Image (cartoon, grey):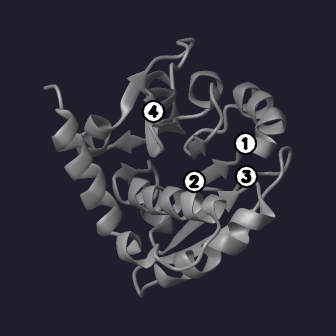
Amino acid sequence: MKTTGLTRYILLLSLLLSTGLGTSLSYAATPGDREYQIKLAFLTNFISYTQWPNHTEKLNQFNFCTSSDRFKELATPHIQSKNSAQRNFVLLKVKPGEELQCDLLFVLTEDADIWQPYLAESKPGSILLVGERRGFASSAGIINFFLAGNKVRFEINLDHLESSGLKISSRLLRLAKLIRSGENSDD
């Protein structure tokens, strides 16, 4: 089923508002921080719409990893606000070569040159790999953010998703641009 532009906009808006960030973005943030707040809203929703294999023994803890000190600092209050009696979110800064204890890894543009070859070679398994640099999803990641008309959008690599063992809800898949490995993104 093809999603119309208006329907897609409404779904994206409801995704943002469901995190509570849709209304909290009005503070005086720099343009870069605002973009990352929006991406953070998407990331936390990706968690809600993704199932991890063998996650039953870890249901009470979710390791949210990033490659950036700046993003970790920006994300910490939001991630801590998601903690509940059922699930504890832990925000970790990681580097390539470390043993990754991540459920989700967000790789920022400035770190993509280091991470993309490492992730493509190591194939880390059931980690939701999310980036923001053109080509990230086609080469190593599962989800990649891109800007289209000053709006944050995302693409999902179906081949990488399938090989990871993760399951993403069809509701989220309908909002994404779907690609396959080796396809060039036209974002």
Kindly identify the amino acid type of the residue bearing the numbered disc 1: Thr
Q: Is residue 129 left or right of residue 111?
A: left
Determine whether label 2 and label 4 are within 8 Å by CB. no
Measure how far apart labels 3 and 4 are at the Cα level. 23 Å
Q: Quadrant of residue 113?
A: top right
> Residue at horizontal 64%, vertical 22%?
139
Neighbour tally class for label 3: few under 14, some 14-19, many 20 plus, Cα within 10 Å: some
Nearest to N terminus: mark 3 or mark 1 = 3
Q: Quadrant of residue 117?
A: top right
Q: Which mark is residue 109?
A: 1
Kindly identify the amino acid type of the residue bearing the numbered disc 4: Glu
Residue that carries the numbered disc 3 in the rendered image: 100
Residue that carries the numbered disc 2 in the rendered image: 104
Q: Is residue 108 left or right of residue 64?
A: right
Q: Is residue 151 left or right of residue 172?
A: right
Q: Secondary structure at mark 2?
A: strand
Q: Quadrant of residue 93?
A: bottom right
Q: Secondary structure at mark 4?
A: strand
Kindly identify the amino acid type of the residue bearing the numbered disc 2: Leu
- Of the pair 9 and 160, the residue shown nearer to us: 9
The x and y percentages for residue 67 are: 76, 54
Q: Is residue 76 above or below residue 10?
A: below
Nearest to N terminus: mark 1 or mark 2 = 2
Nearest to N terminus: mark 3 or mark 4 = 3
